[in-house]
Structure formats: C-alpha cells, structure tokens
Image (cartoon, helix red, strand yellow):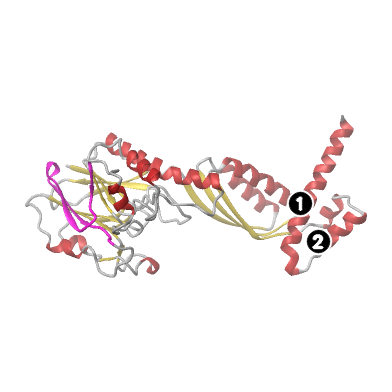
Amino acid sequence: MTLLLHTADWQIGRTYARFAPDDALALAEARIATVERLARRAAERGADAVLVAGDVFDAQAVSPRTMRRLFNALAPYPGPWVMIPGNHDAALAEGVWAQARRLELLPPNLHLSLQPAIVELPELQLAVLTAPLTQRHTYDDATAWFDEAATPAGWLRVGLAHGAVQGLLPEDVDATNPIAPDRAARARLDYLALGDWHGARRIDARSWYAGTPEPERFKDNDPGHVLWVRLQGAGAAPQVEAEAIARHRWRERALSLAVPSDVDEAIALLQACGADEVLSLLLAGHVDLAAHQRLQRALQAAQARLRALVVDAAQLRLAPTAEDIAALQADGYLGAVIAELRDAAPERRRTAQDALAILATLLAEQREAGAAAQRA
C-alpha cells in the first residue's frame, strides 16, 4: 500500500490588511507553523510522499526570509515532496520560484515541477503527472496531456493539478484554469490531487480538492484539512481520509438585537470563543444604554482573548429609553447636549449615537467614582 499526503493552497506570504497589525502577523505566522505541523504528521504517519497542488505562495513578491522559513518548515518530513505552482505563484520567468532557485533554497528532497512533466518515484513505483500553471490565468485545460501520457506498466498513476473542475464549482471560480470533470477516468489515474478550491471537497472517487490547511477567510467550505490517500495498487479505488490540522477557527455570525435576551445571546457567543478563534460579528437592530454598555464590555474582553475579532456595528442603533436619559442625572448644558444627541437628524444619527454612548459611559464612570469616594 502507498500512503500519500495531499495538501494545497498554503498561500505563504498572505497579508491580512483588514486586521490589526499584531493579529495580521500572527495569522501569517500560523500558515508557516501549519506547514511544519503537516510535515511532522507526514513523518509520524509514515507517508510515502507529500503532494502539494499549487499556491504554495500567495504572490510572486515574497521576501527571501519568508521563503527560507517556508522551506525550513518542510524539514520534519525527509521523504519526497512533489510540488507545482498554482495561479498565485505561477511559474513565471522572474517569479517567486525563479528567485527560490536562484537563492538555492529548494531542499534536495523537493521535486518541483515548473513545466508539465512526469515525476517518477521508482522506489514507490509511482508516476506523478503534473500540470503546473505557467501564468495566472489560462483558458486551456493544463491536464489534457495526462490522457496520452505513458507511464511504466504496473505503476501508480497520480495527477497533480491546480484549477477549477468545470461544471461542479460555483460559477465565480469556474472561468479560468479549467479542468475536465472526468479527467481522472480519461487519463486512467489512480488519484487526481487538486488545488485551488480552499475547502476539502470530493469531486469523484479518484478526484479531490485538499483545501487550504489553514483558513484565511470567512468562507464556510470546510477548510483546514489535509487528505490522506491510501492506494492499494494500480487500478484500485483510493481510500481518502481528511484530517483537521488548522491552528485557527474562522467564524462569521450575524446577530439582530432587539430585546435583552438577544444581547445575552451575543455576550454568550463572545464568552464561548477561545484563543484560537477568528470571529467576524455583524450586529444589527437596536439596544438601550444599559445593554450597549454590557455589550461593549463583552466585546472588549473578547478582543483581548480571541486571536482576532472583527465587528461591524454600522446597523446597530443606540435607542436610549427615557429611564436611561433620566439615570444619567445630567441637567443644564449636559442635559441639552444629551437631548440634541438623542434627537439627531438621520444623516447625523450614527455619529450622535456613538457620542451619546461615550458620554453615557463617562457619566456612569463619574458616578461610580463619586460613590466610591463617599464610601471611603
């Protein structure tokens, strides 16, 4: 039996501009750490080879330091790595792979295929038919040559490709870098290892997307895995097992707040999140001052605990009750300001609500400080 580890879409060098700088750095670091983790798993489970189906790098402009760290992360697994470029790191004349070669960074056990080729691993009686991308977008099927490719009799035939299987993926990812949906059957492949779709996905019994091993977006398509592929022999159906390997869990939630129990639900959600969570929270509806202050405290606590928290509260309206306003115990000039903020025109409502929330917090803190001083 031959045991292969199938992975893809590492996207090393990816930036996270929407996050705070320290969170962005940690998320980028996690991608390299996950590669090292999957290398250790390949060694622990005795993989015969690791197949990487493109987009090792997220862009052509990756620093030499990042490249060195990535190739160092492969060290725990001493067996053969077979890699191809994808659309993000296509094999351009002066691209990231040319630079890696020029700097002599490629380890000796890495079989990098920059042109369509058959990578033969005689000790495994395994022939890997590769379809690397040599430009970011192509409208021809780079796997078409597999059908006529000759490999040694009795050897395993495995395809390695990066692109969109036609007719099976959403239309917005089905325009470039096409792959025929029946390629495995037409090319008599024992297995077709695919990259480009960032979630683990079965196309047919012999064709799979591994997905990215470390999620990088809020998309619920089953990312964060590697695939273990067992091949009993030429012609036998592969046995494919997904293993979760990601460091971070990305989630996106939308909550509509109207009554106190809705705020309780939002706070419970935040409190249940762990240190490895990346959470995008969309808040809508309306809350009174007390609920707003409770929610802000929960958000601040979660911001310090989670790996990253992105909050969109543009549709959440602060709606203070008459009791809220009275409780502020503000008269004179402050009372007039509060009334103006409360009754602001629609075009100023968001700014006015933010100002009212800040003012209410300051007044509450002032009252608490005064009460503490009296007790002392």
Question: Which residue, as the protein is rendered here, is positioned at the far right?
Answer: 332
Does 120 appear in magenta?
Answer: yes
What amino acid type is highlighted by mark number 2?
A: Arg
Location of the C terminus (image quadrant): top right
Q: Position of residue 101 (x, y in %)?
A: 27, 48
> Which residue appears at 85% of the width and 60% of the height?
339
Q: Tell me if residue 210 can be seen.
A: no
Which residue is identified by label 2?
342
Q: Which residues are magenta?
A: 109-134
Residue identifier under label 1 = 358
Question: Would residue 136 be found to the left or right of residue 284 on screen?
Answer: left
- Residue appearing at x 88%, y 50% in the figure: 329
**Residue 350's x, y, as percent?**
71, 62
Q: Secondary structure at mark 1?
A: helix
Q: Residues within 10 Å of mark 1 (few under 14, many from 20)?
A: few
Q: Position of residue 98 (x, y in %)?
A: 29, 53
- Going by the numbered disc 1, the residue's amino acid type is Ile
Q: Quadrant of residue 2?
A: top left
- Residue at the spot 27% in from the left edge and 37% down from the top edge: 77
Give coordinates of residue 260: x percent, y percent: 70, 52
Give the CA separation, mark 2 to mark 1. Answer: 13 Å
Farthest residue to the left: give it: 153
Query: In screen coordinates, is 186 left or right of 321?
Result: left
Out of 162 and 94, give the one closest to the viewer. 94
Q: Give the position of the N terminus as an image quadrant.
A: top left
Q: Is residue 314 magenta?
A: no
Tell me the tag on residue 281: none
Residue closer to the observer: 195 or 235: 195
Question: Element under label 2?
Answer: helix
